[in-house]
Amino acid sequence: MRKFLLLFIILTACQPQQEKASDETITTKPRILSDYELEGQSLEELRIIRNEIFARKGYRFKSADLQDYFSKMEWYKPKYDNVDSLLSETDKQNIELLLKFEKMLMNSVDWRNALIGIWIKKDYIDSLPITNSPLAINRIHMGVSEMHISKDEAYKDTIFVGAGFNNHEGAGFSIYPTNEKSKFTSKLDLSYRDSTNVSFEIVVLNSDTLIAATKKNFTKGTSEKEYYSKVTRNVENSKGNAAYGIEMVTNEWIGGDYTLKDKNGKEIKSTVTLAQNGRVIGFKDFKEFSVATDFIAYPIDTDVIHFSKENFREYENYGFTKATDEILLYNIIEDTVDYFEKRGQIVYRLKKK
């Protein structure tokens, strides 16, 4: 019996201890925060810490990014539009301290430098891996679909923003600095299909990766806020292409090494590579590829990928569907009466390696 008991104790002691997942943060327990704890935190981290105080009281956020962030927390139960009466004196002191640190960082950040880059809508980046279809989320591109701000422009009194509109037309507009260092606004109306009496306001939310842009329609009396993520600082690489950032993100989503198979799954070629820079290796004699993201030019009911030789002298278009580990390529059937393109039969399979 003693041997059995000893063996049981040894086996129990040798079993790995299960660590409980913890979502505790420095605001979980009610106490006054110190300067030491906040030193070294980024502007975005300070913003999250401050808003967590409100989140733990059940506040429903009006900012989409904060609502999305805290919705992932098991403890978050949004119930109130105002929680001021629920804040303790400790909460209020911590909020005041956090705001002080945020203000210090705001004054130290070079916001003009933060503007430099190519910006596209955050919704497109987030939605593409979920839908696996640029066509399905095409409406996201309506309005200002992409913004290019170069280093040469960022430090001028009048900052020219190269822009894509509806991911179909290239144009631009000017923004101007305000008394708030992270905020820039357009004084001239922008030209939209729905109205010409529209202005644009850009606020940099952190030092390098996210901005909020508010479109104000004075004719309709409406205001719409959208979030843009920076995809690269290298504006010069776009060479004037107003959809360069969208193409970058789309190519990265579909890119990789694949095994080429026929429609029945028989292997044709061991490796086909779709690179982020739009180059293709191993698929027939083609050198370049591009995924359609502009669906305004012609009606279509399928996602399309174009393969071409140098400078598009010879090309082939395929409809496609994409799953986690496989792309199916279809021939395209054109309705010559309604000029409508649709997906036909499977001709190739690209299996992710």
Image (cartoon, helix red, strand yellow):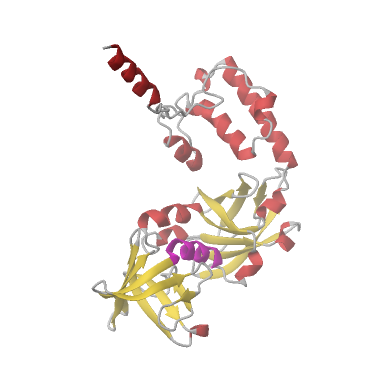
Q: Within the magenta stretch, is there residue 88?
A: no
Residue 326 in the image: state x and y as whole percent: 33, 64
Residue 57 in the image: state x and y as whole percent: 47, 23
Q: Quadrant of the N terminus?
A: top left
Q: Between residue 345 and residue 154, name the one nearer to us.
A: 345
Residue 190 in the image: state x and y as whole percent: 58, 61
User: Could one spot residue 261 in this view of the protein?
Assistant: yes
Question: For residue 338, what is the image quadrant?
Answer: bottom left
Report the residue at 47% width, 55% height from top: 125
Q: Main secondary structure of the magenta part?
A: helix
Q: Between residue 247 and residue 154, name the one nearer to us.
A: 247
Question: For residue 140, what is the image quadrant?
Answer: bottom left
Up/down of 181 relative to 304, above or below:
above
Magenta stretch?
A: 244-256
Report the residue at 40% width, 28% height from top: 16
Furthest residue in direction top, as rendered: 2
Report the residue at 40% width, 55% height from top: 129
Question: For residue 334, what is the image quadrant?
Answer: bottom left
Up/down of 156 relative to 111, above or below:
below
Q: Quadrant of the C terminus?
A: bottom left
Q: Within the magenta stretch, is there residue 252?
A: yes
Q: Say left or right for 87 vs 134.
A: right
Residue 194 in the image: state x and y as whole percent: 47, 61
